[in-house]
Amino acid sequence: MARERKRRAPMAEMNVVPYIDVMLVLLVIFMITAPLLTQGVKIDLPQAASAPIEPDKKEPLVVTVSASGKFYLNVGDGQEKGIDDALLVQRVSAVLRNQPGTPVLVRGDKNVNYGRVILAMTLLQSAGAPSVGLVTESPPSPARK
């Protein structure tokens, strides 16, 4: 009596368990590194009740004025290094020539001399910025009882 052998059809299913493991590892890595990607100069922004700016397709050009009165620009090399007035005008005008319509903002520390913020705004206008916005923090909301 000859035994008949049943032939199995090949499985066409894909094992996704290794892919899930890789995705979880990537998720953990991105969750850990995302807060570290924030760069900039630590300043204490003044608080004011204002509406947030409309999200735009273009990344804004931000000039930061630290408490010591130094200028920092969020483009180019050495964003953590202070720049002088002439270099600020040169870099801003180059960016505005290459990308017209780029929003320009000033982040001034609340302890900085008011004249330094006005000087930054004047330098930005001389570099060709049609308008300059100011960055503030929202005031803390009153606690509900």
Image (tube, rainbow, N blue to C red):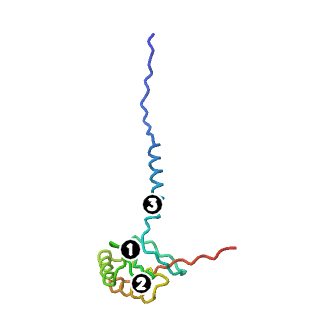
Q: In this rendering, would 88 be left or right of 134?
A: left
Q: What is the C-alpha distance between the residues marked 2 and 3?
A: 31 Å
Quadrant of the snapshot with the N terminus: top left
Place of residue 86 in the rendered image (x, y in percent of width and height, measured from the top left): 31, 84
Q: Nearer the viewer, mark 3 or mark 1?
A: 1
Quarter of the image holding residue 8?
Answer: top left
Is 120 located above or below residue 7 in the figure?
below
- The residue type indicated by label 2 comes to Gly
- The residue type indicated by label 1 comes to Glu
Q: Nearer the viewer, mark 2 or mark 3?
A: 2
Q: Which residue is mark 2?
A: 69
Q: Which residue is mark 1?
A: 80
Q: What is the C-alpha distance between the residues marked 3 and 1?
A: 19 Å
> Which of the two labelled residues, at mark 2 and mark 3, occupies the earlier sequence position?
3
Q: Which residue is mark 3?
A: 33
Q: Residues within 10 Å of mark 1 (few under 14, many from 20)?
A: some
> Which of the two labelled residues, at mark 3 and mark 1, occupies the earlier sequence position?
3
Quadrant of the snapshot with the C terminus: bottom right
Q: Nearer the viewer, residue 10 or 89?
A: 89
- The residue type indicated by label 3 comes to Thr
Quarter of the image holding residue 16?
Answer: top left
Place of residue 71 in the rendered image (x, y in percent of width and height, measured from the top left): 38, 81
> Which of the two labelled residues, at mark 1 and mark 2, occupies the earlier sequence position?
2
Disc 3, SS: helix
Q: In this rendering, would 90 be left or right of 9?
A: left
Task: Residue at the far front: name it.
Answer: 68
**Labelled disc at residue 49:** none
Disc 1, SS: loop
Place of residue 141 in the rendered image (x, y in percent of width and height, measured from the top left): 60, 76
